[in-house]
Image (spheres, grey):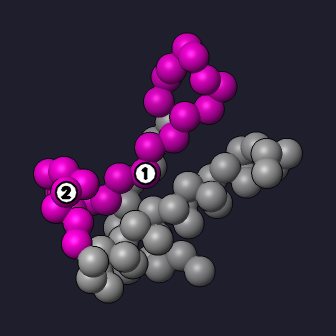
């Protein structure tokens, strides 16, 4: 289930090498992935971002497993 409480922004990029390429980024700035820690808050954020990506992928390319 996707949490509406974790704001993320999603947009498609224009890359010649791929058919579809989406970026899902958190609204709150995280300087680098090294800033993420083993805590519930960061796990929830990354899980939510993955869920958003999977939802978009299934909607845009349902044939992709």
| Residue for point 27% across, 59% down | 27
Give neighbour class at mark 2: few <14, some 14-19, many 20+ (Cα, 10 Å).
Answer: few
Location of residue 48 with respect to 19 vertically, above or below: below
Residue, far top: 16
Residue 49: give its label: none
Location of residue 42 with respect to 30 vertically, above or below: below
Query: Total marks drawn?
Result: 2
Q: Position of residue 45 (x, y in %)?
A: 36, 71
Q: Quadrant of residue 30?
A: bottom left
Residue 24: give its label: 1
Residue 34: give its label: 2
Residue, far bottom: 40
* Mark 1 or 2, closer to the camera: 2
Tell me which segment is drawn in magenta: 13-37
| Residue for point 57% across, 17% down | 17
Q: Is residue 55 left or right of residue 27?
A: right
The one nearer the camera, 24 or 34, is: 34
Magenta span has 18?
A: yes
| Residue for point 35% across, 53% down | 25
| Residue for point 46% across, 71% down | 47
Give neighbour class at mark 1: few <14, some 14-19, many 20+ (Cα, 10 Å).
Answer: some
Magenta span has 47?
A: no
Q: Position of residue 5 (x, y in %)?
A: 37, 80
Q: Is residue 31 left or right of residue 57?
A: left
Q: Position of residue 38 (x, y in %)?
A: 27, 77
- Earlier in the chain: of badge 1 and badge 2, it is 1
Q: Position of residue 64 (x, y in %)?
A: 79, 45
Q: Main secondary structure of the magenta part?
A: loop
């Amino acid at each position: 289930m996707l949490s509406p409480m974790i704001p993320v922004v999603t947009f498609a990029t224009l890359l010649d090498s791929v058919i579809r390429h989406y970026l899902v980024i958190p609204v709150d700035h995280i300087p680098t992935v090294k800033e993420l820690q083993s805590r519930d808050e960061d796990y929830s954020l990354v899980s939510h971002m993955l869920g958003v990506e999977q939802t978009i992928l299934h909607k845009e390319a349902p044939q992709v497993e």
